[in-house]
Image: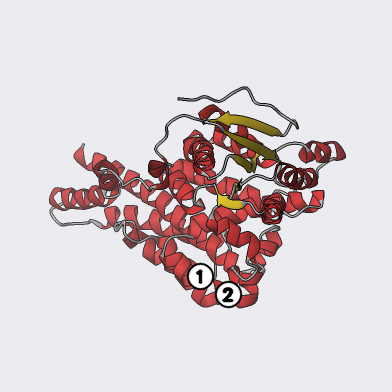
Amino acid sequence: MNDTQPPRTPSENVTVIELGGRTIHIVGTAHVSRQSVEEVQRVIREIRPQTVCIELDANRLEALTDSSRWRKLDIFQVIRQRKVPFLLANLALSAYQARLGEKLGVKPGAEMLAALEAAEEVGAEVVLADRDIQITLKRTWGGLSLWSRLKLFGALLTGFFDDEEITEEQLEELKHGDLLGEMMKEFAESLPQVKTPLIDERDIYLIKKVEQAPGEVIVAVVGAAHVPGMVRHAGQPQDLAALETLPRPSRAIGMIKWIIPTLVLVAFTWGYFKLQGQDLSHLLVAWVLPNALFAGLFSLLAGSRWLTAASAFVASPITSLNPTIQAGMVAGLVEAWLRRPTVEDCEKVREDSRTLRGLYRNRFTRVLLVSVAASLGSAVGAYVGIGWMIALLNRLAV
């Protein structure tokens, strides 16, 4: 039963919930605001809670506190384990925050580090309240269609390259609002499939982790955009384990992966009998040509070496028939072998990701872009190829 009371707000950015005899102070921050940093420190030092909950998971905490984290990454393992899209998404978001932080004179995530520091000062226990970023991204990516994934890739590129000047008036607004949260909401409106895993589920997850935290007085430090959803779900029963688990693909989804290979096989079989084994070259060209061209072209557009584009060109018609491997994996491994990202490249990933020139100059990020682009090109080519084959077979049937 939800026994929350009307919130008492000592500050417009602090929402107070009374729940089951415990007091929860939710501090809504702007993520890149010096004022938020100062307010987080003030609230924790004045209230002296038993527990401080922060909107971070273990991976993001490590990213904020471990300067050598990128040096430890193995580009070949990232590609083989199919983590490229998720790593790019992290980088795009970090690049966007970093550019805002530079304009506002505050490091992204500074309010979370301030919460950690203040919690240590008052002897409070720290709880990482957000869901693992890998789970969030995988649940988001898994629910997208090919077209939606293309739109997402475009949005990621915008996040990397958009360096629009911000006026003084806008800077003042940024100091008092959660721009990152608002950006996420706008993004969810353009891609409705991402709203549930990226925003709604995390609102629920955050408030449940806060409710599970020990102590009678708790301070939760989260982005201001999460506060309304957290308050709305406070005290309501939720299955937290379900939100932490990657849903197993249904049989239908598993079968979808094999639709194109099956259609291609059926097309060639039908064409073989229809043509009595003669002149199957047209069907072969209809399948191979778009697969190869789109994969190779997308690789080149992402800045690949010619040998990488050639490998995507050759691999795509084959990998499109095997859902267990992608043309992007082949192209990424070849590009990584040709470019050989150095330790210095890894250390400068975050800095270089802030600009178009840096993104392409850095060998590590260039490999990531090439890998994703080749996979998307291969997927587009497969759809074009199967459509072309069906059109040819329709003409034969007439």
Q: Amino acid at mark 2?
A: Pro
Q: Is residue 312 left or right of residue 98?
A: left
Question: As displayed, is residue 9 above or below residue 251?
Answer: above
Which residue occupies the foreground of this view, 46 or 41? 46
Residue 191 vs residue 186: left or right?
left
- Residue at 46 percent across and 29 percent down: it is 236
Q: Where residue 243 appears, x then y in whole percent?
A: 42, 42
Q: 195 or 58, which lies in front? A: 58
> Foreground residue, 59 or 305?
59
The reply to whether residue 161 is in sight is no
* Residue that numbered label 2 is attached to: 341
Residue displayed at 32% across by 54% down:
287
User: Which of the 4 quarters of the picture holds residue 313?
Assistant: bottom left
Q: In front: 338, or 131?
A: 131
Q: Indicate the amino acid at tag 1.
A: Ile
Residue 149 lies, with reference to residue 370, above or below; the image says: above
Label 2 vs 1, first from the N-terminus: 1
- Percent across and percent down for residue 199 are 53, 38
Residue 98: x and y in percent read 71, 54
Q: Compared with residue 17, is residue 155 higher up or lower down, i.e. above or below?
A: below
**Which quarter shows the C terminus?**
top left
Q: Residue at x 85, y 36 (%)?
A: 169
Residue 151: x and y, percent? 53, 43
Q: Is residue 108 left or right of residue 266?
A: right
- The residue located at (25%, 51%) in the rendering is 264
Q: Do the numbered discs 2 and 1 sit on residues whose CB atoms are within 8 Å? A: yes
Under circle 2, the secondary element is loop
Mark pair 2, 1: CA separation: 8 Å
The residue where tag 1 is placed is: 75
Left or right of residue 11: residue 120: left
